[in-house]
Structure formats: C-alpha cells, structure tokens
Image (cartoon, rainbow, N blue to C red):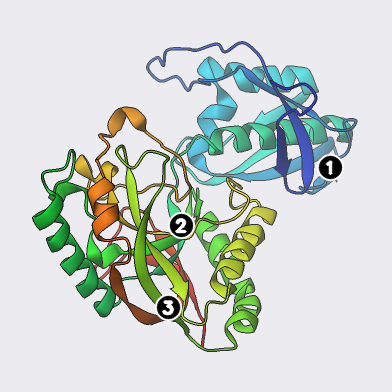
Amino acid sequence: MDVLRPALVNINGRIYRRNAIKDEHYEEQEDDFYHDERGTEYEESATDEVCESHSIEQTDNGFRCAIEVPSVLYKYIIGKKGETRKRLETDTKTSINIPKQGVEGQIVITGSQKSAVSSAATRVEVLMDSFRRKQPFTHFLSFALNDPQIQEGFHAFKAKVLEQCSQDNGVDETIFQNPSKLHLTVGTLVLLNDAEVNKACDHLQEFRHVIKDLTEGKPLPLEVTGIEYMNDDPAMVDVLYAKVNLKDRSDRLQVMANRLVEHFVSAGLMFREWDKVKLHGTVMNTLFRKDSTAEDSGGPGRKNMRDREAFDARNILKTFASYRFGEFDLSSVQLSQRYSTDCTGYYSSAGSVSFT
C-alpha cells in the first residue's frame, strides 16, 4: 500500500482509511459462519466520533443503535464460530444482536456508552462495505439498444463476420451477444434484498428531473455505427463493441451517464470504478463462450482472464470499422436485473425513467 495515498472508503458520507494486514483464511465448518478475510482492518480518518449515519437512541439501560443489514451479510459480521462478533463486542464493550440467517431484519447494538455504540456501528458498517464489494453485481443501470432496426443490423453483422472471419483464431458463433439484450451499461449495483432494490428504484426516480433537463422531454436520436475493442492488442480481444453516438453529436448521453453514476455513488448504492462511464454496446464477448448470460461490469480492462479465450479481431476491425448497425430513438434508462429476461427478451426491469 502507498502510505502517502492510502485506500479510502466512503460510507454514508464519512471517510475511513483502509489498512491491509496479513490475511487469515478459515475453512468453513458445519453449522458455522465464517469470516473469510479478516485481514482487512479500518481506521476512521478522524477521532472515534458519534456515528452520524444511524440514529443512536438512549434507553433505560444505556444506548441502542439499529442497522439495516441484508441477511446475506450476517455471516461476515458473525465470523467463524462467532469470532468476529465477539471481537467487536469485546473491543467496543457493546452487545450485538443479529437476526437468524435468512431472516431479514436489523442488527441491534446496545451499550452503556454512546461512543461505544457509535464505534461498534461504524465497524459493522465498514465490514458490510468491505464484503459488499466482494459480492457479484445483481443489477445494472442500462440504456437498451435492442430496437428492431439495431437487432436487424446486428444479425447482418454477425452473419458477415462468420462468413468472412470465422477462420480467425477464436472467432465463432458462441461469442456473439444475444441481440435481444443489446445495451449500454451505465453502472452496476449490488442489491441484496427487496429493500435495497426499492431504495435504488426510488433513487432512480429522484434523478427524473435531471433526465428531463438533459433530454428536454424528448427521446434521444442515436446512431450505432462502427466497432472498437477494449484492450491494447487487436489480436487478443475479449470484448468488441459497437460505438453509439447522438445524431446531433452532442455529449448529452455521456453527461447523463456520468451524472447517474455520481448520483448513485453519493447514495452508497454504487462503487465508482472509472473517472467517466465507458459507453459501449457489446456485440462480441469471450465470456459468452461458457455462459451466454454472462455480463461484464461495464468498464475497460481484461477481467476473469482464466475463464476467457481471446479472439483475433484484426480482420473484423479492418473489414467492419465503419459498419452501420442502424439508428433509433432512445427513450428511457432502466434498472435492469442481471440473469433475467422479460417478455421482449431484454432484461427484466426493476424500475425505469422515461425521457418523455
């Protein structure tokens, strides 16, 4: 770790410094919960102050704080044989009550001192944030590109690529996108229960006025023309994508995407991965070889390398550099559910905002 530029964690508007220490791994035992990466500790960037992100109530016996925690994260607060919870309780001189596994509810922290309850609540929040980052994303904000004209253009593109470039290393039918699920990924979210999905939907609706200002209450005319690749070597490509632009050549779609991410990051619903959103419509992806429903998280860079066999895209890039997939009017942004399909073949939507 660079001691002059340590990793920081933003939790509900408070900043914490993350300190990495030696990892300790545990094997899961029957009927035990485990804490599989105890090797990450956190310090507050200031002194141990009252927790501002949760209400701490005074009771007849001291103080109490209730924290909403998805049940899937309970085991990380409990730890193997309850070790993590015991350590938290000992360090902060509090009592931490956790619902039964699988039962959605609140983790309740009680103690005789308000500062102790605050400290315990902060540590629980940091643990939640740490392990939430390790969960696979469940939802993503998307702009659908599955307009009939774009699908028709995609089908023609696929047929021509297979006809002219199938002899190139790694190029075959399995790596093409499902045309019904053509889309632009704005950002990914880890939503672990219905309450979090509802919160994300509400937050998307709060962004409605920004969308109306950017679109002037009208659909955005888009054109999908040209292809590009993600990594540095065109002979070893994992993702080939279609380029999408507004017909008026303005940056309104990029501005909307960037501001959407900022909006969700500020609410703690999304983690910032890049300085700006890389808007791209994936048409070929090596993840599809083994799983046709696979999804990248939407950013540049090669991921899951052990599970991927790259393809040689040089001839495709040369032949189809300016390929025209078509044009259409984009009319909404959606909160899409990963690994789902609606009646149109697109991803099931948990919520959406129309531009009109």
Would you say 269 lies left or right of 310 here? right
The one of 99 and 133 positioned closer to us in this rendering = 133
Q: CA distance from mark 2 to mark 3?
A: 21 Å
Cβ–Cβ under 8 Å for marks 2 and 1: no
Q: Is residue 202 visible?
A: no
Q: Position of residue 251 (x, y in %)?
A: 58, 72
Measuring 79% from the left and 49% from the top, which residue is drawn there?
55
Q: CA distance from mark 2 to mark 1?
A: 41 Å
> Residue 137: which disc?
none
Q: CA distance from mark 3 to mark 1?
A: 59 Å
Quarter location, residue 125: top right
Mark 2: which amino acid?
A: Phe
The tag earlier along the polypeptide, 2 or 1, is 1
Mark 3 or 1: the one toward you: 3
Would you say 112 lies left or right of 97 here? right
According to the image, label 3 marks what residue? Answer: 222
The tag earlier along the polypeptide, 3 or 1, is 1
Mark 2 or 3: the one toward you: 3
According to the image, label 2 marks what residue? Answer: 140
Q: Position of residue 242 (x, y in %)?
A: 35, 62
> Residue 59: which disc?
1
In the depicted structure, whether residue 278 falls above or below residue 72: below
Provide the secondary structure element on which disc 1 rests.
strand
The tag earlier along the polypeptide, 2 or 3, is 2
Q: Position of residue 200 (x, y in %)?
A: 55, 61
Callout 2: 10 Å neighbours few (<14), some, many (20+)?
A: many
Cβ–Cβ under 8 Å for marks 3 and 1: no
Mark 2 or 1: the one toward you: 2
